[in-house]
Image (cartoon, coloured by chain):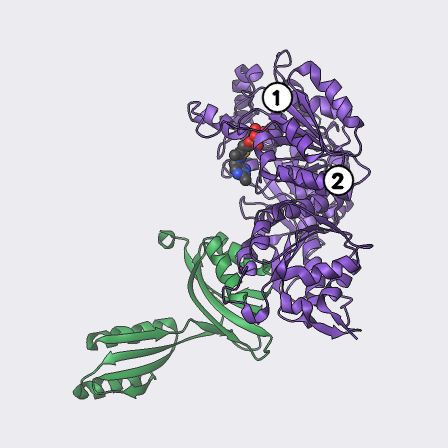
Amino acid sequence: MANERKDYELHTLSVLVENRPGVLARIAGLFRRRGFNIESLSVSTTDDPTVSRMTIVVGGDDATIEQITKQLNKLIDVIKVQDHTGEDVVERELSLIKVSCEPEQRSEILNLVTIFRASIVDVGANTMMIEITGTEDKINAMLELLRPYGILEVARTGKVILARGSKTT
Amino acid sequence: MGIKAAELLVHTLIEEGVEIIFGIPGGAVLEIFDAIYHHRDKLKFVLTRHEQGAAHEADGYARSTGKVGVCMATSGPGSTNLVTGLAAAMMDSSSVVAITGQVATPFIGRDAFQETDTTGVTMPITKHNFLAMSAEELPRIIKEAFYIARTGRRGPVLVDIPRDVSRTELDEDFPIPKEVSLRSYKVTLRGHPLMVKRAAEMIANCSKPTLYIGGGVIASGASDGVRELAERCNIPVVYTLMAKGAFPDNHPLCLGMGGMHGTVAANMALNTCDLLICIGARFDDRITGNPKEFAKVSKKIHIDIDPAEVGKNVKVDVPIVGDAKAVLQQLLENLQPKRHDSWLEQVMDWKRNYPLTYDRSSELLKPQYVVEVTAKLTNNSAIVVTDVGQNQMWAAQYYPCSRPRQFISSGGLGTMGFGFPASIGAQFGNPDKLVVAFVGDGGFQMTMYELATAVLHSLPIKVIIFNNFFLGMVKQWQDLFFGGRHSATMLHGNPDFVKVAEAFGAIGFRVQKPEELQPTLERALEVNDKPCIIDCWVDPNEHVYPMIPAGGTIKDLILPPQFRHKKQELLEQVAAAHAAAA
Ligand SMILES: Cc1ncc(C[n+]2csc(CCOP(=O)(O)OP(=O)(O)O)c2C)c(N)n1
């Protein structure tokens, strides 16, 4: 398994692409045919409607990451690729978590939600849905604490990042 | 009065300098073909017999002229038939533009008649592709397609045009953009000065340098620069199949082709040098064998226009991203003349003592002899196109070339069936030059229908078939590595190629004995208005040597029988060089 190798590391790439049909297929196809692994991917437009931003988390050793970056750059529709691993960036992920919850457990869960600065977005007869934003670690920690109640469903966005200060991403 | 997008497309092609298009029409491209009809005085259309032929012809035209080759097909089966040709062009970085028809935009995605997701299918085998969803963007797309195909690391570009788009009327004076500007596509031409300086220092300080040149040298027009560097600093030159012709075979510093079927001198130099200067090549496994063991003791400089190639297969010490010609010029500004007498002496020893060889006393017609005699009768100056297999290797080994774009072969993809149609493209692009195609009996049958095209256009191509009644190269591997079990390699049921030639209206000759070869070739060379098929019945048991088996190292070298007893000597030299470096 590639990810058991000791030089294997996760990298977060910010990729600016032309906002055109087929661009996602080009990127996905590139990863597939060259055997690169996408851990997470999020895509959205930027304030410039002709440009989309993809934040891609990939795993690999240095040489693999270098190849991924270069191969991405080679795609005609890719405008810019930056590897922000280890840089001063704000990284966020959003997650919706549905837990089973008897009415008497609601206040316990509400406490957890407050501690994590998450919020309750839906309450059912025996369920609660929580929305949480933060780093991957924070969301994982929240999930661990909610697990004993019974997690019914989870939806996570991929990670998005922006560089701090005046530096661009 | 407006102008149809199809008409504007043809204007744009003519403006791009297109003179010839290879292809086959169909429902989705009728509008475009009608526009071509109106401009037939300026734009020649060559109707091929299969779209694969069209793609290889466009490719052969591109490789032999340095211009962009253009092919055209209808939607669905037309475009899927182009696929092999595009993949071959992609692997060898050849400037091809393919224009395909697509079903009308309202039908896209509905499995309409003859609908194929052409851009989806060709995504990994083109440098880029476009689906033109509106007539307004078509001229810009065509301009971009040509720009992308002929700049940077060259490659094929496909433009898919729905039939309603080509039919759309635009204003008469709808502008064709003059310039292309792509914010996401920038090519670095000049090398980083610091890296160039470092490379120059390495060259100044090394004692056993070797140049390893690839197809990028031809694409960038860097042959003169390579020659200047080799001569000024006395550096022997090894070329890849793709670079044959970029450095003259008869030059004293030329060691020939390296890799799997490379010369002993080339592979010994690669594996014992202390500095390897790679220009426009990509450390492909047909050159390196096992990449971990390849040129193990040398420092490496890698000059390539494609940043992704640098460091991909082999670690290098000095990476220089840039155009070969521009970087060589920079490098030469930093280099003083230099000699490496003892290294050159060593290299010349290998060249002298381990030449390419075969049994010249045989009563059978030897394929190597066929190439040698052809080379002699054509003054080493024909454009040589090969198919894939043993024929390809023998042509590369025994036909001395001296100019770029003289030798054309499907290297990266190794496409059987490439040779003959590519020779047609080359002949169209070079009407005044002699074109010779060396093909196997297997590969020729994959695209021999193109004889119709060649006859129709009176192309005097000499097609030399190495008829060994086998898929020769596969048989060779079976002989060497599978106990001689010829599983599905004997070509039972081959046609009579002389009759095939005649049926198409070409001229057929047969050569069965060595003494028949020269007189027959002389007769064929006199023909100047028809293709000639020269069906040479060669020794089916001949093997291509030397050979380093796939994934192997110089230690696995199989020498021709004549030198087999001398292998130990070579291995000791390799070991000594490695020990000295350690
Ligand atoms: C389209 C295609 N199919 C299969 C192969 C695998 N292959 C490589 S060489 C070869 C044999 C070629 O035989 P022939 O055309 O007779 O040429 P020879 O080697 O005898 O010169 C084959 C089948 C290939 N390279 N291309």
Question: Mark 2 — on which chain does it sit?
Answer: B
Image label count: 2
Between residue B501 and residue B478, name the one nearer to us.
B501
Percent position of residue B62, x then y: 71, 47
Mark 1 is on which residue type? Trp
**Mark 1 vs mark 2: which is more N-terminal?**
2
Examine the rendering and report whether any part of residue B256 can be seen. no
Q: Which chain is purple?
A: B
Specify the label residue B316 is tagged with.
none
Q: Secondary structure at mark 2?
A: helix
Mark 2 is on which residue type? Gln
Percent position of residue B345, x then y: 68, 23
Q: From this viewpoint, which residue is outermost toward the front?
A: B503
Q: Which chain is green?
A: A
Percent position of residue B93, x then y: 64, 48
Please give the residue where the numbered disc 1 appears in the rendered image: B537
